[in-house]
Image: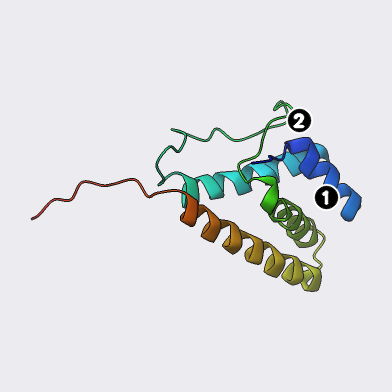
Amino acid sequence: MKTTTIDEAINYFDEQCPNQYSREEKIGWLSELDEQIYEEIIKTRVGAPAAFDGYDDETAGDTVLLVPSLFKEIYRYWLEKSVDYNNREMGAFNNAMAMYQTYYDNYFAWYNRHHRVKETKQFII
C-alpha cells in the first residue's frame, strides 16, 4: 500500500492551507497524531511495532507516517484543526475537526478489518 512521508503531508497541507507555522511545529503535531493512532489503534494488533518513538525537528522528511496514503487526508485535517485552534478560529476549527474525525473513523474501521487483535490470556479469579 502506498505510504505518505512527513514532507509529503506537510507540503500537501501547506498547498491546501497556507499558514505561518513552522515545519517543526507541524512535525510536532504529526508526531502527536501518530502517537495517538499508535496507542489507540495499532498497538493492540498482531504485527504491531513494539513502540512508536515519535518525530521531532531532526526526523528525516522522508520518514513514513503510520497512516497509508489512502487515508492521507487525516493528516491534512489534523494540521488544519491545529492551525485553526492556535489562530482562535473556532468555526474553522470545528469544521476541520469534524473532517478529521470522519477520516480517523474510516481509517480505524479499515484497520480493524485488515488487522487481527492480539490475543490476550484469560484468567479466572
Residue at the image point whose x is 41% and y is 45% from the top: 45
Residue 20: percent from left, percent from top: 89, 48
Q: Secondary structure at mark 2?
A: loop
- In the image, residue 2 sits, relative to residue 111, either above or below, namely above
Horizontally, is 14 left or right of 66 in the view? Answer: right
Camera-side residue: 11 or 94?
11
Q: Residue at x 81, y 67 (%)?
A: 89
The quadrant of the rendering that contains the C terminus is bottom left
Which quadrant of the view contains residue 61?
Answer: top right
The reply to whether residue 116 is in sight is yes
> On the picture, is 46 further left or further right than 64?
left
Residue in front for this viewpoint, 2 or 31? 2
Instruction: Please name the residue shown 40% across and 49% down the image.
Output: 116
Say few, some or many: other residues with alpha carbon within 10 Å of mark 1 (under 14 / 14 to 19 / 20 or more).
many
Q: Earlier in the sequence, mark 2 or mark 1?
A: 1
Amino acid at pointer 1: Phe
Q: Position of residue 16 (x, y in %)?
A: 88, 54
Secondary structure beneath label 1: helix
In the rendering, at what x and y percent does residue 103 appear? Answer: 65, 61
Three-letter amino acid code of the residue under disc 2: Gly
Above or below, comparing residue 64 to residue 95 in the picture: above
Which disc, if any, is residue 13? 1
Q: Is residue 21 visible?
A: no
Separation of marks 2 and 1 at Cα, in angstroms: 14 Å
Residue hosting label 2 = 61
